[in-house]
Amino acid sequence: MTVAAAGAGRRYALLLAVNDSDYARKAHGGYRNVFFRALRSGEPDEAWDCYRVIDGEFPAAEDLGMYDGFVVSGSPHDAHGDGAPCWVRRLCLLLRTVHAMGKRVLGVCFGHQALCRALGGRVGRSPSGWDVGVKEVTFVDDLEWPFEFLPVEPPRSASIIEVHQDEVWEVPPGGKVLAYSDKTRVEMFAVGDNALGIQGHPEYTNDILLNLTNRLVNNSTIDGCVGEDARRTAESGEPDREFWSGLCKAFLKGSGCAGGGGPRPPPQGPAAELSCSHHVAHFPATGSLIGL
């Protein structure tokens, strides 16, 4: 575990589900710093701890109560399938536990999908294949915006970096679809006022996108034409990072129950919730474990 800051104010846990690439380490000091730069409010008493869940590093059950919120990163692994690694299943159980405790939970890309699975939704491969690049996300206009703590309603649309081949098929019970795109039906969803999933990467910068695109093309994970399209979108402009960063910060800090969602299930005992021995939900097994 890495402690990024200390203080008596709000405390958050970053659950890293990805190992640092050479580029991320050299250019940004690792994905931990990428997230911290995007999500830390700058308040002197705000504290962030980092757990590398991909390596089996999880917060202790007795420490969960000290956190105000949890953030789950993207990952090269899938969030679906009974063949998922033990740490993925353990992560889903952890997310279900902290959600039941009323903690704020923000899921990004893989984290968006893992949060959906943990709370009873359905996740799987996108039938339209990989989505990579700076893409436009449209917010639902016939649904009351559920987060009363945001200073303003969102714009009609906002651009965000996307790198994924999996998607949310069905939001969890009580969940609301908040945004969509031409390629992905659920770009953002909420369950009550304390669970938010975002399919895109609010923390990514264009240089990270370009490096990742090149690596995916070079190892034949994506076709060259998909890579070219992704590079073209990055060259055309930056994503709306300020908006997405502000939205995530406001969600993590916010209070109130504007989102509704009904009563939350009572948390089970820590030993059962953090076990690797059972599943929150069952999904069809898929082929290769490549998802971001």
Image (spheres, grey):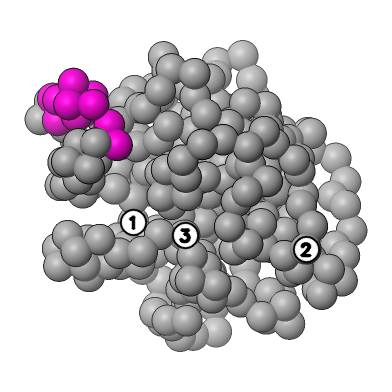
Q: Is residue 62 magenta?
A: no
Q: For mark 1, does the 10 Å Cα neighbourhood hold few (<14), some (14 to 19), or many (20 or more) residues? A: some
> Residue 38 got which mark?
1
Q: Which residue is mark 2?
A: 277
Say which of 47 and 283 sits in front: 283
Say which of 88 and 120 sits in front: 88
* Res. 65 image quadrant: bottom right
Amino acid at circle 2: Ser
Say which of 225 and 183 sits in front: 225
Which corner quadrant holds the C terminus? top left
In primary-sequence order, the first of circles 2 and 1 is: 1
In primary-sequence order, the first of circles 1 and 3 is: 3
Q: Which residues are magenta?
A: 221-233
Total numbered badges shown on the rendered structure: 3
- The Cα atoms of the two marked residues, 1 and 3, are separated by 17 Å
Q: Is residue 228 magenta?
A: yes
Q: Secondary structure at mark 3?
A: loop
In primary-sequence order, the first of circles 2 and 3 is: 3
- Looking at the image, residue 117 sits to the left or right of residue 101; the answer is left
Q: Secondary structure at mark 1?
A: helix
- The Cα atoms of the two marked residues, 2 and 3, are separated by 20 Å
- Looking at the image, residue 228 sits to the left or right of residue 270; the answer is left
Q: For mark 2, does the 10 Å Cα neighbourhood hold few (<14), some (14 to 19), or many (20 or more) residues? A: few
Q: Position of residue 285 (x, y in %)?
A: 63, 37
Callout 2 touching callout 1 (CB < 8 Å) = no
